[in-house]
Amino acid sequence: MSHPVIPAPARFDDGPGQFALRPGAPIVYTAPEVTTTVERFGSELTRRTGLRLAPAAGPPAPAAAEPSVRIELAAADEPGLLPRPLGLPPEGEHAPDERYSLTVDTGQVVLRAAEPAGVARGLTTLIQLAATRTSDNGEIVIPGARIADGPRYAWRGLSLDVARRFLTPAEVRRVIDLLALYKLNVLHLHLTDDQGWRLPQGRPDERPDRGEAFYAAEDLRALVAYAADRFVTVVPEVDMPGHASALLRIRPELDSGRNSVERRSASGQETRTVWLDPELPVTFTLVEEVLTGVAGIFPGPYLHIGGDESWGMPHDLYVSYVRRVRDLVRSIGKRPVGWQESARAGLAPADTIQYWFSGIAFAPSLPPEVAREMEADLALSRGDVDAAAAASARVIVSPMSHCYFDVPYAEPSADPAQAARQARAGLRIYAPVTVAESFGWDPAQALGADRNPRAPRVAGVEAAIWTETVSDFGDLSFLLLPRLPGVAHKAWSDPRGGAWPDHRDRLAWHGRLWAQDDLEYFRASTVNWR
Ligand code: TNX
């Protein structure tokens, strides 16, 4: 086996010797700011392997003492470290340095990084190296290695739809754990949609819950802190002006008499959707109250304003809405991000959009008029990318062809017991794709292979999991795994050496990690699960 680390490190050379991780081996570190990260590593390692190490803060013991894991905070310009990442850091100006080097030798493992974030990423690599191996009479032998690693893109995330299906805070924490395991640093929470309004803001005082699940401000603050501990930034999305039915249900005063539309959804059902009317005075009173409240909960610099699929809304009203909401977000000290449609309201270099509508094969059963609508959307989508390129705006790439985890799996599962779940989980408007097909892309080419000068405007990569077909947490993790590590690899790793067979062979070891976490995953028959 080469190595099982996902995302694959920038440099990984086999070294001489090997390190035997034994119970009670010290983890030596001197910098107090890495204490929580080191302690978490210790408990993770114990949980996954049964091995208990001994974190030891303080001056390093003399060399040639017992075998140990040493953690050193070193200067960022240390030789061997890689260039800084491309794209846009989700943490704003205070982007942490995630680069690290890790050396596994006989008698010693040495991890060096400039900052705690790099230490955390390096320890994650060590977890993967250790927990994918079987322990032999209580010790785990890790082959010698010299690793130098750092992210390709600064923004690496997952958009999680908690509007279509509410996830409890404990379930969201399990997703954050997965992000951290794959060195992803953004949890984009899609908090509102036609089917649900999960924010504490915007609710009527008289009856805030109306029988619908939502997060209390304390829940959200606790999730932000949990994520921050793992070097993950939460980006909240309040999806408006379209997809606003759930808000209108709790705030009927937003009904302007013209902003509710019946339409046939892509799956063929008649549905009602609502767009917020910027000409109704109460609209912006409420939007301001909601966004100000949201900005007070999420400390990150970015606030996602949605802006997708505002069906039935006149174009001029859409433009005026988006411009006004961007100004509002800036006035409360945040930077707006919008789905790609928001490009149609004009873009400046400081704007960021999220590209999603890529060419994708739809199921043959799609009604012809819906298929025609999709074709028209694809043409508009190309215009959004052109507009972003012309304005030098930043683009988070989430092409649905490769980043949408609600696309059904094409190959059979190696486990016949998964057939029912496979038939249920995933949106049937899309033609199914194999795990290998969904891995076959390069973020730098996502905005057009022919015009690569656009690549520098790529802010980073986000996968998205939409939950229309998710009925329980098992469905969710089944759709995420094994595809999430694939997107993490695309976002973090060097595109050279990123061939599917190598990734597939690494992936084969990760089923163990998911089993340790009690996570249901799609046992793709194309992978030789270990
Ligand atoms: C498009 S992507 C949507 C979502 C759906 C998803 C289904 C985007 C901005 N909007 O509302 O859930 O397709 O794949």
Image (cartoon, grey):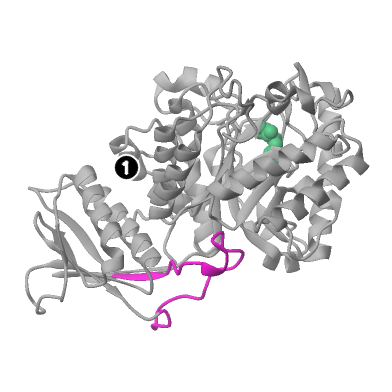
The residue located at (48%, 41%) in the rendering is 220
- The residue sitting at 64% across, 33% down in the picture is 192
Q: Is residue 311 above or below residue 69?
A: above
Q: Residue 464's spot in the image, x, y percent?
A: 59, 41
Q: Is residue 476 left or right of residue 461?
A: left
- Left or right, 16 with respect to 98, comes to left
Does residue 380 lie above or below 261 as drawn? Answer: below
Q: Which residue is mark 1?
A: 513
Quarter placement of the N terminus: bottom left
User: Between residues 40 and 244, which one lies in front from this camera angle?
Assistant: 244
Q: Quadrant of the C terminus?
A: top left
Callout 1: SS: helix
Please check the rendered image and state whether residue 85 is part of the magenta-colored stretch, yes or no. Answer: yes
Percent position (x, y) of residue 289?
68, 41
Observer able to see residue 400: no
Magenta span covers which residues?
A: 76-102
Residue 239 figure quarter: top right
As for residue 361 lying within the magenta part, the answer is: no
The percent position of residue 160, horizontal first and vertical second, equals 55, 39
Farthest front residue? Answer: 206
How many residues crowd mark 1 within 10 Å: few (<14), some (14–19), many (20+)? some
Residues 226 and 61: in front is 226
Q: Nearer the viewer, residue 510 or 251?
A: 251
Left/right placement of residue 101 relative to residue 209 reads left
Residue 278 in picture, x, y percent from top left:
85, 39
- Establish if 136 lies above or below 173: below
Q: Main secondary structure of the magenta part?
A: loop
